[in-house]
Amino acid sequence: MIEILATGPVNAIQDAGRFGYRAQGVSTSGAMDPVSMRAGNLLAGNPETAATLEIQSFPLRLRFTASRRFAVTGAVAPMTLGGRPLPANWTAVAEAGEELVIDRPSRGARCYLALAGGLDVPDVLGSRSTHLRNDFGGFEGREIRPGDVLGAGTPFATRAGEAGVVSPMAHGATAFGTEVLTVRTVAGADLDMFDAGRRRAFWDTEWRITPQSNRSGYRLRGEALTLPAPVSLYSYGVVPGIVQVPPSGEPIIQMADANTAGGYPRIGGVIEADLWKLGQAAIGSRLRFERVDFRTAAEAMSEIDTYLAAVRRAVGLLAG
């Protein structure tokens, strides 16, 4: 269906994630920006959780070996089909032999390529996501490489024409690129282990995402949050969004491929509704933590529901 002609490292197949196996030490994986992944699937006529190609290194160049509808969502990146420029967050039909090129984004960090019918790879433990750390799932348990040929399933819907949607990055005051990204965060279970000065520094510091960051976690650089003495905690369950502080004092935000257990002090937790924003934050980006309560964290999920409802309406117009 598509032949990979050129790609950077770490681009791999991801879906909504692998759930129900954390007790066995298997992390969720899945898309770093699940909102864009779901929007791409809607535009391609798929169930929202179908397998997509997560692209985080550029350029990507591929050739369609058969006619197929596709959608590219997420980061705002220059994109051409058969040499013809396409807008960001767009769906179109490619003809056999046409090449799609996605270049380095001007805004955001990751794009999602959805093919009508979803990428056809084996279901492993209830998901088609690639677990890169443990080499299973996705396409042969690894990142894609030049020469790979990826297939797609039978399309779920037949649609004509082209259409696009507004990126979630265009909503509200969300900042990407050279600006400071604000992510809403609840107090962590171990916040009181830190003195008043370090607690204040956590909320007030402008943190930078360091090159020592990946799908497992983002290590931040700013004011060191070292404790006066080493702390030994019993291991506890870890989920994406938890902000841990290792002995170095450099906070780590757990991401999609996070470990299932850990023992560093938990100073905060990025709310679920803002995790997609971190998925679109590039290495070197700056961010701040905004403290919110648990009620605000729960209510914030309605923002994602509203956005995806708008995408569904756009898809309805396209189908008509």
Image (cartoon, rainbow, N blue to C red):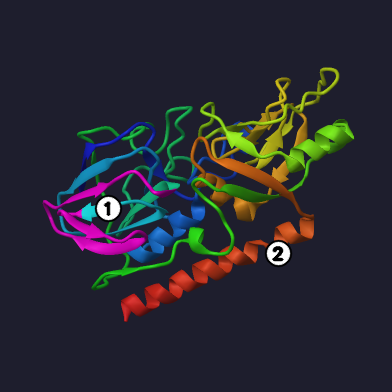
Instruction: Say which quarter of the image contains residue 229.
Output: top right
Q: Is residue 254 left or right of residue 99?
A: right
Q: Is residue 102 left or right of residue 177?
A: left
Q: Residue furthest top?
A: 230
Q: Name the kind of residue labelled 1 in the image.
A: Met
Which of the pair 282/310 is nearer the observer? 282
Return the residue at label 2: 299
Query: Of the numbered discs in the image, which one, if any, rests on residue 217?
Result: none
Residue 115 at x, y = what percent?
Answer: 30, 55
Q: Residue furthest front?
A: 178
Q: Secondary structure at mark 2?
A: helix
Return the residue at label 1: 79
Q: Mark 1, residues whose alpha carbon is within 10 Å: few (<14), some, or many (≥20)?
A: many
Q: Is residue 243 above or below residue 289?
A: above
- Viewer can see residue 265: yes
User: Which quarter of the image is occupied by the C terminus?
Assistant: bottom left
**C-alpha gap between disc 1 and disc 2:** 35 Å
Q: Secondary structure at mark 1?
A: strand
Q: Mark 2, residues whose alpha carbon is within 10 Å: few (<14), some, or many (≥20)?
A: few
Instruction: Magenta stretch: give its range.
Output: 81-107
Q: Is residue 158 above or below residue 29?
A: below
Residue 158 at x, y = what percent?
Answer: 26, 71
Which of the pair 109/3 is nearer the observer? 109
| Residue sitting at x 55%, y 48% | 179
